[in-house]
Image (cartoon, helix red, strand yellow):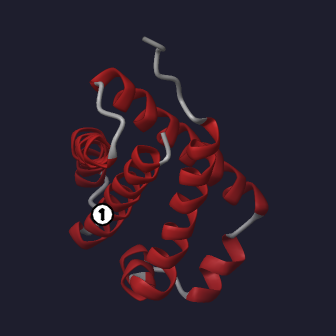
Amino acid sequence: MEPMTINYLAVIVAAIVYLIIGWLWYAPLFGAAWMKAIGKTKEQVAAGASAANYIIALVTSFVACYGIARVMLWYGDVSVRGGILVGVLVGVCFVLTSMFVNDTFEKRPTGLTFINVLYHLVSMVVAGIILGVWH
């Protein structure tokens, strides 16, 4: 039996989709609520944007998608079902818990925490689906 390997093209595509979801999430969908929660205007957010921010976001999205692919292999279910399960598991057990602890001690608004956590949870589930379909 041939060992399963990671499809790096699928990981790259999933990472790009992760960024596209971020653009949708923080622009048309929840942009106004997010900016209000962080206390910034659209102009302030735009002024702080740089190419480096997007490169960092792409690299970290790639690492997250690689991790999802790796966990799917370890779990032994490289399928849509496995991708959804791993995406939810990673999103809830690592992202949700870490962000809630940080945001609690930083006294950040709970609404901001939910916006950020749900972005990563949705993105990780979608990445898991992409990786499960394209194995």
Total marks placed: 1
In this figure, which residue is indicated by the disc labeled 1?
A: 118
Q: Residue at x 30, y 63 (%)?
A: 118
Q: Position of residue 130 (x, y in %)?
A: 45, 52
Q: Position of residue 125 (x, y in %)?
A: 34, 54
112 relative to 60, above or below: below
Q: Amino acid at mark 1?
A: Leu
Q: Position of residue 17 (x, y in %)?
A: 55, 61
Which quadrant does the N terminus fall into? top left
Find residue 20 and report its image quarter: bottom right
53 relative to 39, above or below: above
Task: Please state if 39 lies on the left or on the right of 74 as rendered.
Answer: right
Q: Nearer the viewer, residue 84 or 29?
A: 84
Task: Please state if 111 lies on the left or on the right of 58 as rendered.
Answer: left
Q: From this viewpoint, which residue is outermost toward the front?
A: 1
Q: Residue at x 26, y 66 (%)?
A: 114
Badge 1 element: helix
Q: Residue at x 36, y 77 (%)?
A: 37
26 relative to 56, above or below: below
